[in-house]
Image (cartoon, rainbow, N blue to C red):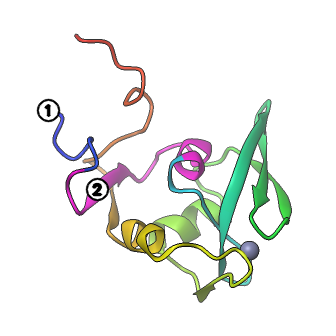
Amino acid sequence: MNSGENGKTAGRFYRKRVELFRLLDRIKLWPSRKGILHGIRSVETIGGAARITTHCNKTFLVRNSRNSRAARQLRNKMFVKPCEACRIPGWKLEKYSATLFRRRFGSFLTTSNAMPQA
Ligand SMILES: [Zn+2]
């Protein structure tokens, strides 16, 4: 069962309870409190938190919570507009908009990069 994991399909599925940091590392987008979608330049994990640096040079310290505001906003695609300073490419926004979150189906993003031939 590898369908949807290789990036060839238009829609991809992630679990609703995927870890926030893994999700951020994968989609490289950060929703601000005001609903502005920023592009992530780097995710630096520090214990149970991560320092997010956006392309417009904002930094946020976030906890690795599946139920945080940011996680919820990402899952529900609650954002007003993309940040102009971040210059998020259109393909990235399209990929994100094609991303779906399902409770019982999709990737937890835990093993997809390092999975041995089982
Ligand atoms: Zn920005």
Q: What residue does disc 1 label?
A: 1
> Residue 20 at x, y = what percent?
59, 48
Q: How far apart are marks 2 and 1 (CA)?
A: 14 Å
Going by the numbered disc 2, the residue's amino acid type is Arg
**Image quadrant, ligand 1:** bottom right
Q: In this view, does 97 lie to the left or right of 53?
A: left
Q: Is the Cβ of the residue at disc 2 closer than 8 Å to that at disc 1?
A: no
Task: Look at 38% across and 73% down and name the residue there.
Answer: 94
* Tag 2 secondary structure: strand
Observer-nearest residue: 72 or 9? Answer: 9
What is the span of residues highlighted in magenta in the rendered image? 8-25
Q: Does the magenta stretch include residue 87?
A: no
Task: Decide: is 41 above or below 92.
Answer: above
> Residue 2 at x, y = what percent?
18, 35
Task: Look at 74% across and 65% down and name the residue there.
Answer: 55
Q: What residue does disc 2 label?
A: 12
* Tag 1 secondary structure: loop
Q: Does the magenta stretch include residue 15?
A: yes
> Residue 50 at x, y = what percent?
77, 43
User: Which mark sits nearer the N-terminus, 2 or 1?
Assistant: 1
* Rendering quarter of residue 6: top left
* Rendering quarter of residue 80: bottom right
Q: Which residue lies furthest to the bottom in this view?
A: 80
Disc 2 under 8 Å from ligand 1? The reply is: no
Crowding at dot 2, Cα within 10 Å, few <14 / some 14-19 / many 20+, comes out as many
Task: Look at 32% across and 69% down and name the residue there.
Answer: 98
Observer-nearest residue: 21 or 26? Answer: 26
Going by the numbered disc 1, the residue's amino acid type is Met
Task: Look at 60% across and 55% down and name the residue there.
Answer: 67
